[in-house]
Image (cartoon, coloured by chain):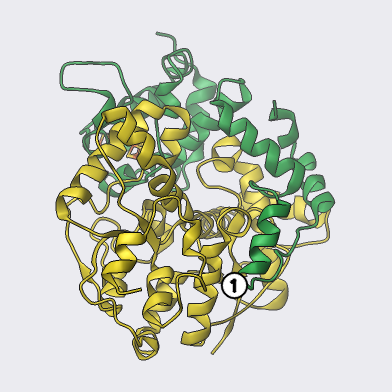
Chain colours: A green, B yellow
Amino acid sequence: MTVDFEFRKQVMDYHIGSDLIKYCFQCSRCADNCPVTNVTTDFYTTTGYNPRSNILNALLGYKDAIFSADALTIWGCTVCDTCNEVCPQNIELTEIFTLLKNQSVANGNAPDFIYSQARAIFDSAKAIPTQPAIERRREQLGLPPVAEPDVSEFRTLLKNIGADKKLK
Amino acid sequence: MTEYKMFEGCTIGNRIPFIEAASRKVFDKVGIETSQTNFSCCPDPTGMKSFDNDAWLAIGARNLCLAEAEGKDIISLCNGCTNTLRGVQHQLKHNSWKKDKINKELAKIGKEYKGSIDIKHFVDVLSDNLDKVKGAITKPLNGLKVAVHPGCHYMRPAEWMESDDPMRPTTLKKLVEASGATVVDYGEEILCCGSAVTNAYEEHGFANLKIKMDAIKKSGADVIAVNCPACYQQFDTRQRDLGKAYETEYDTPAMYITELYALAMGFTPDDIGLKFHRIRLTSTLEKLGL
Ligand code: SF4
Ligand code: SF4
């Protein structure tokens, strides 16, 4: 297994509490309380989704172990934030997992719904754009029309950041 | 009372607006004033944040700028929107280089993020006004058995949500009890609905949802009380497929806490568009004599 020092540095720098991640002592409370680990692994298997091994591989810089494995390794996480609460070392695991997901998106390996939602947001500034049938329903329910965002200003912002380049 | 900027979010505003209707009616009764502005998508803390954290920050900060321009706090109807807007604020307040980076981008569209307003989940605002809520209840939901599902992003991460206890939440229970209904404990209250993982891996999402639904069924609950549109949709639209996958019947309706309140405050099922629920509420309404 090769160590990618650049990746390791990115991981160390990412956390708001700087290098907190290096205090992980692999106690496995995160995995023991993860709902997805619960339904994808049993005591005897090493497959399935496991937040503890993701933290270990990230802090050691084992980039390939994370990104060359099945996409479930990264995208199994349902972002319930339970691991953050149970970790005795106060590691915000989901922030590290955000970094992993962002890199997986840039590599083109994320699940389709991630790209399609980003596309909808880029096109209309809404994850779910306004639809005539729903507008009529709003009216029937006595609701005001949704206040429409300034789409062109919104897109300028996204383009300047370069997020449009990650779209599929 | 202070006026809030209403953040109904994409899902409620543009897909399930009947939840907004019930919520606005309840806010009126309680005296919570709101006004609109041109917010974009929050954006989604499981989707867009996973896509690109910087884009998520910039879009969220732009929304906060719109509320800051009016000097008003935001009231959100959705766990995801609250989690994003509070999470963006958290990152920008604790990370000066990120704040500088985002403000450089915002300057190009004539905006600046200052961090001068607060973002409130509507459940917390209702909880702060519980006396007024109780005062507005004219038809208590006596006899209705309710399982509560506050949803992950309402209370976690505690670091920036600063609302309820992240592992032993009580606020939604308290709100349901105020309606006259009875809360039934089912032991899996803090388990995720699994919305995000179901989008990517349906079989794993269903395996998780089954654990949740089996516990709810066993508790004998008539309804699941929720305060998040993603959780609402997970329960309302995916129970049927879950039932097919496991050859069991799952049909416990999910209702927003504001839908329960609207009924308890005397509105009719038609006033708040309950017919737009996928899972029929017939037996629930019969039980309430509606
Ligand atoms: S709970 Fe925290 S310290 Fe324990 S293995 Fe998980 S990340 Fe490491
Ligand atoms: S946030 Fe992700 S990794 Fe953490 S417990 Fe939830 S599903 Fe598991």
**Given the image, on which type of amino acid does mark 1 rest?**
Ile
Name the one closer to the observer, B161 or B210.
Answer: B210
Q: A97 left or right of B253?
A: right
In which quadrant of the rendered image does the N terminus of chain B lie?
Answer: bottom right
Q: A159 left or right of A6?
A: right
Q: Residue at x 33, y 46 (%)?
A: B192
Measuring from the top left, give residue B100's x and y in whole percent: 68, 53
Q: B23 left or right of B53?
A: left
In which quadrant of the rendered image does the C terminus of chain B lie?
Answer: bottom left
Which chain does tag 1 point to?
B
Measuring from the top left, give residue B269's x and y in whole percent: 45, 70
Classed neighbour count for the residue bearing mark 1: other residues with Cα under 10 Å, few (<14), some (14–19), many (≥20): some
Task: Decide: is B200 above or below B158.
Answer: above
From where the camera sits, is residue A111 visible? yes
Cβ at disc 1 under 8 Å from ligand 2 = no
Q: Residue A24 is drawn in which quadrant?
A: top left
Name the one closer to the observer, B74 or B14.
Answer: B14
Measuring from the top left, give residue A49's x and y in whole percent: 33, 25
Measuring from the top left, give residue A37's x and y in whole percent: 28, 30
Q: Residue at x 79, y 45 (%)?
A: A155
Task: Decide: is B186 above or below A72.
Answer: below
Task: Decide: is B166 above or below A102.
Answer: below
Name the one closer to the observer, A119 or B139.
Answer: B139
Q: Residue at x 79, y 40 (%)?
A: A159
Disc 1, SS: loop
> Label 1: which residue?
B117
Task: Decide: is A124 above or below A32.
Answer: below
In terms of image quarters, where does ligand 1 lie? top left
